[in-house]
Amino acid sequence: MGPGVPVSGWPLAGTLLVAVASSMVAGGEDCLWYVDRNGSWHPGFDCEFFTFCCGTCHQRYCCRDPLRLLTERQQRHCLAF
């Protein structure tokens, strides 16, 4: 790296790129059936393109926020407990 080349922005840019790429890959992620805190059963549903399943073991919805992503693997883990 030569003098005057900013280096500090690259880790942030890489993190942002990974977050965007993961959200695009996860687009259309399905929400599996679940039981809420009251014991009520809710059927599974599909999320639209560029959205994915978000929430918790007891409440699920479709969103675009990769920080709220609930993968199908995580959802199956919820079912086991």
Image (cartoon, grey):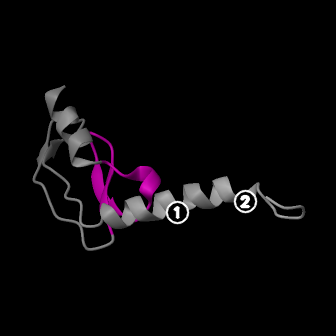
Residue 59 in magenta? yes
Q: Total label count?
A: 2
Residue 14 in magenta? no
**Distance between the alpha carbons at the discs numbered 1 and 2:** 12 Å
The three-letter code of the residue at mark 2 reads Gly
Horizontal and vertical percent for residue 64? 40, 65
Picture quarter containing residue 22?
Answer: bottom left
Horizontal and vertical percent for residue 19? 48, 58
The three-letter code of the residue at mark 1 reads Leu
Q: Residue at x 15, y 61 (%)?
A: 45
Comparing 50 with 5, the one in front is: 5
Examine the rendered structure and indicate whether residue 23 appears above or below residue 36: below
Picture quarter containing residue 53?
Answer: bottom left
Secondary structure state at the residue bearing disc 2: helix
Examine the rendered structure and indicate whether residue 35 appears above or below residue 16: above
Numbered tag placed on residue 70 in the rendering: none
Secondary structure state at the residue bearing disc 1: helix
Q: In which quadrant of the rendered image does the N terminus lie?
A: bottom right
Q: Residue at x 16, y 44 (%)?
A: 34
Q: In which quadrant of the rendered image does the C terminus lie?
A: top left
Horizontal and vertical percent for residue 55? 34, 49
Q: Would residue 21 be found to the left or right of residue 75 on screen?
A: right
Q: For mark 1, what is the residue?
A: 17
Picture quarter containing residue 4?
Answer: bottom right
Which is more N-terminal, label 2 or label 1? 2
Q: Residue at x 32, y 63 (%)?
A: 25
Task: Name the outermost residue toward the front.
Answer: 2
Numbered tag placed on residue 9 in the rendering: 2
Q: Residues within 10 Å of mark 2 (few under 14, many from 20)?
A: few
Q: Residues within 10 Å of mark 1 (few under 14, many from 20)?
A: few
What's drawn in magenta, residue-wise?
51-70
Horizontal and vertical percent for residue 37? 24, 35
